[in-house]
Amino acid sequence: MQRFLDLADFSREEIVELIDLARRLEQHPEPRVLAGRILGLVFFNPSLRTLASFQAGMARLGGTSFVITPGQGTWQLETCLGTVMNGGAAEHVREGLPVLASYCDALGIRAFAEGKDLARDLAETAFHTMAEVVDKPLINLESAMNHPCQALADWKTMDELGVPRRGKFVLSWVQHPRALPLAVPAATVHMAAQRGMDVVVLRPEGYALPPEIMDKARAAAAAAGGSLRETAQRDEALAGAHVLYAKEWGSTAHYGDVEGDATLRARLADWCVTPEWFAAAAPDCKFMHCLPVRRNVAVADAVLDSARSIVQREAYNRMTAQMAVLHRMLSRGE
Ligand code: CP
């Protein structure tokens, strides 16, 4: 495997094989398989799970890693092409990333959406600028519109907790003090569709996912025998649901418009998941969230602390799923 950038680049069967490998590595650890291998991790944005789970996963396979946080102890890196670099960035990714890639066997990059120009973010312009100068295996640690590592971990989590493959999966917008990127909702809706589920995107007016994201997921659903639709009607969306996956994202009707988004979300305080949301759901409906989450803004304590919540399992599976990716990418048997 040379690149792990988008779950959509892999067939359903290839994803199932990766999850099987992750399970095998849990049952039969291979603590020396990546001895002598080095993973470079570049974080333009903060992280808790992605950073720690990649370092821990690499160490559990016998490899090592280094972390670069541009601008924090290292030079700030410019990502835009054609920029007159007379500002804060001392170095361009076109020089900096090949240097880092030359020190390691695989590189991971996290670079969130700029959140100003929807078309530019949908095109993954910044990530592509970086990917094209990296000549080593490359992992997307969350880009403008994708988070494949989260999606793989969530798929594995649903499999091991017995969520039916053909079950009903509701991705719901939830409240947050400010607009957040579309990467997780885009990756999540595609993952559930590719798994073959009946997917419903529940969101208030002004927060519809862009057609580019919905069309891609709809095609995946059709190929896997599932379905995809969106609604603003909570009761109808959640009736019979097997999974409620909560996520915060910014208004697509006011993309890049901080005030417009703030005005809209100020009226949406009731989009905080409470136990009442599950009234008509399947009895064993699971609650999922990628974390981090703001308690009692996005999700009530009573949900996060309930038996429905599988957020800790999702976070744990970040490590186990990524170990399978690293194994495929870097073990010499491949
Ligand atoms: N879910 C996730 O990617 O968490 P971090 O932002 O902490 O890495």
Image (cartoon, rainbow, N blue to C red):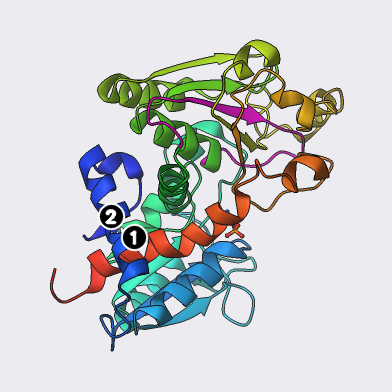
Residue occupying the point 69% across, 13% down: 235
According to the picture, the residue beneath numbered tag 1 turns out to be 23
For the record, the magenta segment spans 163-183
Observer-nearest residue: 266 or 64? 64
Count up the numbered dots. 2
Pinpoint residue 181: horizontal percent, then vertical percent.
Answer: 60, 41
- Regarding mark 2 in the picture, which secondary structure is present there? helix
Q: Main secondary structure of the magenta part?
A: loop
**x and y percentages locating residue 156 in the rendered image:** 41, 49
Circles 2 and 1 in contact, beta carbons < 8 Å: yes
Q: Is residue 181 magenta?
A: yes
| Whether residue 133 is visible | no
Would residue 275 be found to the left or right of residue 34 on screen?
right
What residue is shown at x 56% (from left), y 37% (from top)? 182
Above or below residue 265? Residue 30 is below
Q: Secondary structure at mark 1?
A: helix
Residue 329 image offset from top left, x and y in percent: 25, 66
Q: Please tell me whether residue 87 is drawn above or below residue 286 in the rendered image.
A: below
Which percent across, then down, holds residue 67?
Answer: 51, 77
- Is 145 magenta? The answer is no
Q: Nearer the viewer, residue 212 or 200?
A: 200
Question: Quadrant holding ligand 1?
Answer: bottom right
Give the residue number, with chain letter if any, for mark 2.
20
